[in-house]
Image (cartoon, rainbow, N blue to C red):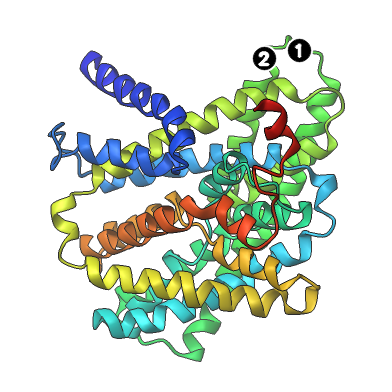
Amino acid sequence: MDQLVLLSALLVFLAFLLIPLSHRLGAPILLLVLGVGMLAGEDGPGRINFDDFQVVHSLGGLALAIILFAGGLETDFRALRGAKLPAILLATIGVVLTALVTGIPAHWILGVPLEQGLLLGAVVASTDAAATFLLIQHSRAKLPQRLKNTLVLESGLNDPMAIFLTLALTILVNSGASLSPAELIDFAPLLVMQLGIGLVAGLAGGWGLAALLSRLHLPDGIAPPLALAAALFIYAATSLMGGSGFLAIYLCGLVVAGRMKGSINRILHFNEGLQWLSQIGLFLMLGLLVKPSELTATWVEALVIAAVLMFVARPLAVALCTAPLRFRSSEQLFLGWMGLRGAVPIYLAIFPVITAGPVTVEFFNIVFVIVVASLVLQGWTVAPAARWLGLSPSEKADPENQEQS
């Protein structure tokens, strides 16, 4: 145990030290943390042999729950007035469209059955909350409020639809059945349960937790862990009831932030620290899990699919979902470009691998390459894209930067 704590603490410590470097380089910190994990892994100088997909899937779910709760707490519910409808459309219809437009070409590119191609499309269809929260915060891009809130809210809400599609298509692939209207109708109750129970549990749990925190007079150091424990209870209970625990805990954070009376700063700061720790721990585990020597077999196909996702599927889904909502063309282009992939697709890729079916580790490796491509190309260009589209003032024109200089 001492050796495990020593090694884990060292890796996390080194990952935190990379934050100033990521700011200076303009690189996504999560990409650098993935690199640390890969260097520490079996193919790197660290030579750590770690290939337990089941452990990463279990711990990854907990880490994502903490990340989403913190993201909900940090979102100003009162400022979401113009962002709710576009975010909901992108988080539902947008995810389905992205999965279809990515999955069908993946079926041709990889030479796999259509169902497996659509499964790959479903896994990479949702934008990642952790990546979106971090990159928007640290990109220094001063985006219009509606645009920023749409991106943040969408990234918190779209995981349930991606999870539902991944579960349904994994069951379909493992059973050997073909995709048909009858099969889709059979999965409708699962979708209703996932979204319905998650919605009710998140809103009701958040309302109850906000009321409790507002009435209890607790020492300053007790309220933050109490809030997190309650939120994780709501997440786990919702999952056990067949709902989306991720949707529930994100909505819980949103409601607590909007309804709690008194200062919420201590709860925010506590969960911000845990959010960072969870993100870094999760990306370190994912980096350890990857063997770079195994990525070479399909990296060309993975990059082609990544190009389809970034340049065709996501922009098309955004255009169709936001067409009637009076977004400017520059805002639509930015929404289309900011389809950041991160921990969630890699986490979802583990599920079909650990189940009894035809999907192998190669599937996970393809998703990993797609996520890295997204973090490199899209994550590195958040601020430049915003400035190029006229959505954010350049640093030279920014009064704050002029004062600092």
Q: Are marks 2 and 1 in contact (CB under 8 Å)?
A: yes
- What element does badge 2 sit on? loop
- What element does badge 1 sit on? loop
Q: Is residue 338 visible?
A: yes
Q: Nearer the viewer, residue 19 or 122?
A: 19
Q: Nearer the viewer, residue 228 or 200?
A: 228
- Going by the image, does 103 lie left or right of 292? right
- Residue drawn at (40%, 53%), measured in percent from left and top? 376
Place of residue 173 in the rendered image (x, y in percent of width and height, measured from the top left):
33, 76
Can you tell which mark lies on residue 320? none
Find disc 1 in the rendering and name its residue. Answer: 218
- Residue drawn at (84%, 37%), measured in percent from left and top? 259
Place of residue 361 in the rendered image (x, y in percent of width and height, measured from the top left):
22, 60
Residue 208 appears in which quarter of the rendering?
top right
Residue 77 appears in which quarter of the rendering?
top right
- Going by the image, does 376 lie left or right of 236? left
Q: Nearer the viewer, residue 136 or 41?
A: 136
- Residue drawn at (57%, 79%), measured in percent from left and top? 316
Q: Is residue 170 visible?
A: no
Three-letter amino acid code of the residue under disc 1: Leu
Q: Residue furthest bottom?
A: 181
Find disc 2 in the rendering and name its residue. Answer: 222
- Residue drawn at (37%, 59%), measured in percent from left and top? 373
Place of residue 215 in the rendered image (x, y in percent of width and height, measured from the top left):
86, 22
Whole-number angstrom distance, CA of label 2 to CA of label 1:
6 Å
Q: Nearer the viewer, residue 28 or 244?
A: 28
**Which image quarter holds the C terminus?**
top right
Place of residue 404 in the rendered image (x, y in percent of width and height, measured from the top left):
67, 26
**Which image quarter holds the N terminus?**
top left
Three-letter amino acid code of the residue under disc 2: Ile
Mark 1: give few (<14), some (14-19) or many (20+) Cα within 10 Å: few
Q: Is residue 298 above or below residue 361?
A: below
